[in-house]
Image: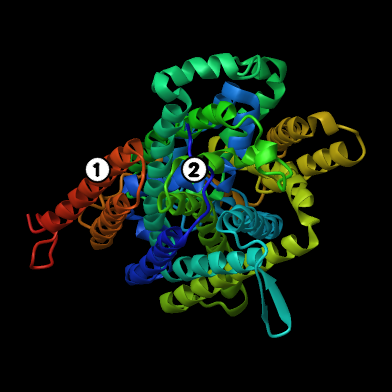
């Protein structure tokens, strides 16, 4: 039998506080990695591929994976595996097509692609349409995250008055979360984002690896681990272990797959990861790593949630205050199966899932505003180029400002309760319509400089009509995806009937096409000091996480929990130790990378 659902205690608070301090401290330490804006926004193009790969993978996570996706699995069953492993196909397309092209594009910010392939006006147009919903998305992410964090911590009913303002426990949690984000992203730049993403990957992995077997041991009871599968087969609703939902709703699943192709190849943060590594071979390695993780890691939370369908058949009775109680299924497993301390680690994992998504967005949004707007406006109106020191200062101020706006958005959403549905509708309108020209622009260079604006505008107009004039409510998601892609692609290719006539634009487009044909071999980052220092930082963080797991063995728990915690702690510390050993061998006492002179 499983234990009663627990409440967090002081041990959990210590674990969560320690996690937040590690994030903040890492960001402040990594400030030394940034000598200029190029370091801040792309790591100088020297970030090791495995760090960039793990960061890319977890950047696609948010609290949604432990909340919304878990709820979908709880309700639909094994068909959810089709959805939540579909990133495998998206990264597969990246390996064969887009990873190398992003690296060959030789960019300093993601939207610089629009300027090189289309025009500066296209960059301004996309910036205008992208920044506001992106900031709103950051705020919504913080809001959704903190609903569950505040509930788990038992501070929803807490309030404090500061001057003339009374803040709820939920708002306090959003402010604290946002401040931590602001400190480490505005201080450390992309290096801080990626290094902390690696730390957060291990926290997420540890929690899911622990809950996976524990859920099946609990469900199997005296019959053992494998008896749990028999119970799932016998006690779940009819069709729960079939792909009937896929057969009944094929358009939804195909639309989701197409959105995956777009999201994992054309999204700005994906491009930023691909060009932040030294070579296009490294970029392809990122695709392979992410594809394998996308095929395997989701199983670690899909399977336990399916077990939770039998363990907790009345989720509404457990969480009557939630509008969709099934979304608390993964959290319920953690609160039931794990001892205090590991519950704090689970809350940290949910924090980590959203932190990785949010810190990535903050960095690439800042890179767009600084590199594609501020720098170009400075050249246009003052005919000058800001110094590297000035660019780095503006980058940090911009990141801080965006983060502050995200926190404010989260508080506004919490108080108005009216923005969420609008934001969801807004994103479904804009994503496919605007990203399709990006994907096609890498493959076809015969369209004129205005083709992306025309494609996106026509597609947005059609999708808007379909959502306001025509009643498509049962299939709104599918219409937005297919309509956005098809109209945008059609206008894009039709624009080729009017070839580019401006000589400067034609020269720019042809130069970009030539770059895409030229391999980006680059130089390995193995002797780069920042790249080597990243092994030191990541190694220390992983050792600390492993040590924390071993300390949690002091908390009373069942034999299965203690055994798994011991194994995870030892393995984690060994992995961190291996990274530290590698660093020591590469940088001897003299301070020079080993082998550099040879």
Mark 1 and mark 2 residues within 8 Å of each other at the beta carbon: no
Q: CA distance from mark 1 to mark 2?
A: 22 Å
Q: Name the residue tied to disc 1.
A: 571
- SS at mark 2 in the image: helix
Which of the two labelled residues, at mark 1 and mark 2, occupies the earlier sequence position? 2
| Residue 394 seen from this side | yes
Which one is closest to the eye, mark 1 or mark 2?
Answer: 2
| Number of numbered discs | 2
Residue positioned 76% across, 64% down in the render: 415
| Coordinates of residue 256 in the picture (x, y in percent) | 64, 30
In-front residue for pair 166/140:
166
Residue positioned 78% across, 48% down in the render: 421
- SS at mark 1 in the image: helix
Residue positioned 32% across, 71% down in the render: 32
| Coordinates of residue 57 in the picture (x, y in percent) | 45, 42
| Coordinates of residue 473 in the picture (x, y in percent) | 84, 33
In-front residue for pair 259/376:
259
Q: Name the residue tied to disc 2.
A: 334
């Amino acid at each position: 039998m499983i234990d009663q659902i627990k409440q967090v205690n002081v041990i959990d608070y210590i674990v969560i506080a320690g996690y937040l301090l590690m994030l903040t401290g890492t960001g402040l330490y990594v400030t030394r990695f940034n000598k200029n804006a190029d370091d801040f926004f792309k790591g100088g193009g020297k970030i090791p591929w495995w760090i960039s790969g793990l960061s890319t993978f977890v950047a696609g996570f948010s609290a949604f994976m432990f909340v919304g996706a878990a709820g979908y699995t709880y309700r639909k069953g094994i068909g959810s595996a089709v959805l939540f492993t579909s990133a495998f196909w998206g990264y597969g397309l990246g390996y064969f097509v887009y990873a190398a092209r992003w690296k060959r594009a030789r960019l300093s910010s993601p939207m610089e692609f629009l300027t090189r392939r289309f025009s500066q006006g296209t960059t301004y147009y996309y910036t205008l349409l992208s920044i506001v919903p992106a900031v709103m998305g950051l705020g919504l992410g913080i809001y959704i995250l903190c609903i569950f964090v505040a509930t788990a911590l038992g501070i929803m009913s807490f309030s404090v008055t500061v001057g003339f303002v009374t803040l709820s426990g939920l708002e306090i949690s959003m402010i604290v979360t946002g401040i931590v984000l602001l400190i480490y992203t505005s201080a450390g730049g992309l290096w801080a984002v990626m290094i902390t993403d690696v730390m957060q990957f291990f926290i997420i992995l540890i929690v899911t690896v622990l809950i996976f077997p524990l859920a099946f041991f609990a469900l199997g009871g005296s019959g053992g681990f494998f008896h749990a599968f028999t119970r799932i087969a016998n006690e779940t609703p009819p069709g729960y272990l079939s792909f009937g939902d896929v057969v009944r709703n094929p358009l939804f699943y195909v639309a989701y797959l197409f959105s995956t192709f777009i999201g994992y190849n054309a999204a700005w943060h994906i491009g930023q990861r691909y060009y932040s590594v030294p070579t296009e071979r490294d970029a392809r390695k990122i695709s392979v790593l992410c594809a394998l993780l996308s095929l395997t890691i989701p199983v670690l939370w899909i399977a336990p949630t399916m077990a939770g369908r039998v363990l907790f058949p009345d989720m509404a009775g457990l969480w009557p205050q939630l509008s969709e109680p099934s979304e608390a299924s993964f959290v319920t497993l953690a609160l039931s199966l794990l001892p205090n301390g590991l519950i704090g680690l689970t809350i940290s994992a949910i924090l980590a899932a959203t932190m990785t998504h949010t810190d990535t967005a903050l960095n690439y949004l800042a890179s767009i505003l600084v590199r594609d707007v501020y720098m170009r406006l400075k050249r246009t109106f003052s005919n000058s180029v800001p110094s590297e020191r000035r660019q780095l200062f503006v980058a940090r101020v911009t990141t801080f400002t965006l983060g502050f706006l995200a926190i404010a958005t989260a508080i506004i959403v919490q108080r108005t309760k009216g923005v969420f549905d609008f934001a969801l509708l807004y994103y479904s309108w804009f994503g496919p319509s605007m990203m399709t020209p990006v994907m096609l622009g890498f493959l076809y260079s015969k369209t004129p400089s205005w083709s992306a604006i025309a494609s996106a505008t026509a597609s947005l107009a059609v999708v808007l009509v379909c959502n306001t004039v025509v009643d498509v409510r049962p299939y709104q998601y599918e219409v937005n995806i297919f309509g956005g892609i098809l109209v945008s692609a059609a206008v894009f290719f039709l624009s080729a009937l009017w070839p580019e006539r401006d000589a400067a634009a034609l020269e720019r487009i042809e130069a970009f096409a030539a770059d895409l044909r030229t391999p980006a071999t680059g130089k390995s980052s193995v002797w780069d000091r920042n790249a080597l220092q990243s092994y030191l930082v990541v190694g220390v963080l992983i050792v600390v996480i492993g040590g924390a797991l071993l300390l949690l063995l002091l908390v009373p728990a069942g034999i299965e929990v203690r055994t798994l915690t011991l194994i995870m702690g030892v393995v984690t510390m060994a992995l961190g130790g291996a990274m530290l050993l590698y660093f020591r061998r590469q940088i001897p006492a003299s301070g020079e990378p080993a082998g550099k002179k040879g």
